[in-house]
Amino acid sequence: MDNDIFKIAILGPENAGKSSIMNALFGKYVSLVSEVGGTTKMPIKRYWGKLKVGREKKQPKFVDVVFVDLGGLYVHEKQSPIMIGSVLEKTYEEIDDADMIVHVVDGKEGLSKSFEKLHHLLKFRYRKPIIVVVNKCDLLNDDERRRLKDYVEYRLGNRVLLVSAKTYEGINNLMDAILKYIKGD
Ligand SMILES: Nc1nc2c(ncn2[C@@H]2O[C@H](COP(=O)(O)OP(=O)(O)OP(=O)(O)O)[C@@H](O)[C@H]2O)c(=O)[nH]1
Ligand SMILES: [Mg+2]
């Protein structure tokens, strides 16, 4: 943990709904959303609030929770590392600096091999704690949800939360999972 700041980076492919999830977590419009890929260019950093951590009652410790909405990563299937445009450096800085990653999978597109690679790189080489969400679950029926969740969990070896930034389904679960991790419960 970097001083008393806890930084959570929201990462995923273009148009997966990263900014929409950020807005849902804040309950207001903090990051621009549009139907065109490549909307978020430079990382959008927003202060969420203060959180009491640990079990110490007499001298409680607090952290300042900050979310960073990253620009969508342009993925070339055969290339690694992931290629993105001119914001590459800034985006990598933010990833490197993050205390936790929220990896957003586009429920409509599924999980690509490049993001699978990036996920493992972040988890094993950079030792980042990662929460995986499949967004746009409002567009999936029960069967599709189950299949995609099983597939992503199998490929990434990570638990998956189904969310919809549109209907807010699962957004509380995501917030709970993030806060639970920070508080160390
Ligand atoms: N149906 C549905 N659409 C969604 C959901 N989340 C986002 N969208 C739509 O998906 C499109 C992209 O959303 P953004 O939040 O801008 O996506 P992003 O990942 O920030 O995109 P970039 O910044 O371009 O990388 C918009 O048209 C959103 O309205 C969702 O949960 N369900
Ligand atoms: Mg965006």
Image (cartoon, rainbow, N blue to C red):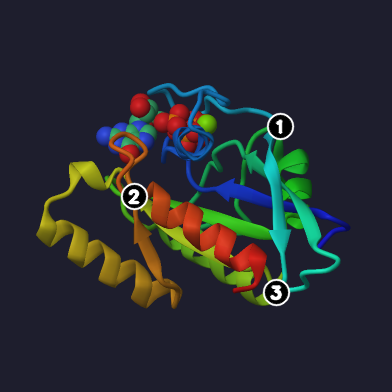
Label 3 sits on residue:
125
- How many marks are shown on the rendered structure? 3
Instruction: Let me know if residue 107 appears in the view.
Output: yes
Query: Helix, strand, or loop for circle 1?
Result: loop
Residue 54: image quadrant is bottom right
115 is higher (above) or lower (below) than 24: below
Q: Which mark is residue 163?
A: 2
Q: Position of residue 161 (x, y in %)?
A: 37, 60
Q: Are marks 1 and 3 in contact (CB under 8 Å)?
A: no
Q: CA distance from mark 2 to mark 1?
A: 30 Å
Amino acid carrying mark 1 in the image: Ser
- Residue 27, percent from left and from top: 48, 32
Instruction: Give the residue at x 77% y 69%.
Output: 57
Q: Secondary structure at mark 2?
A: loop
Residue in the image at 72% along x and 55% along y: 98
Name the residue carrying label 1.
86
Asked whether 184 or 140 is in front, the reply is 184
x, y percent for residue 107: 30, 49
Q: Name the quadrant of the N terminus.
A: bottom right
Quadrant of the image occupied by residue 125: bottom right
Q: Which of the pair 177/50 is nearer the observer?
A: 50
Tell me: residue 34, above or below residue 105.
above
Q: Position of residue 164 (x, y in %)?
A: 32, 43
Q: For residue 47, which quarter of the picture?
A: top right
Q: Report, in whole angstroms, how far the alpha carbon at label 1 lies from the one at label 3.
A: 24 Å
Q: Amino acid at mark 2?
A: Val
Taking the view exactly as shown, the residue that stands out farthest to the front is: 58
Q: Amino acid at mark 3?
A: Arg
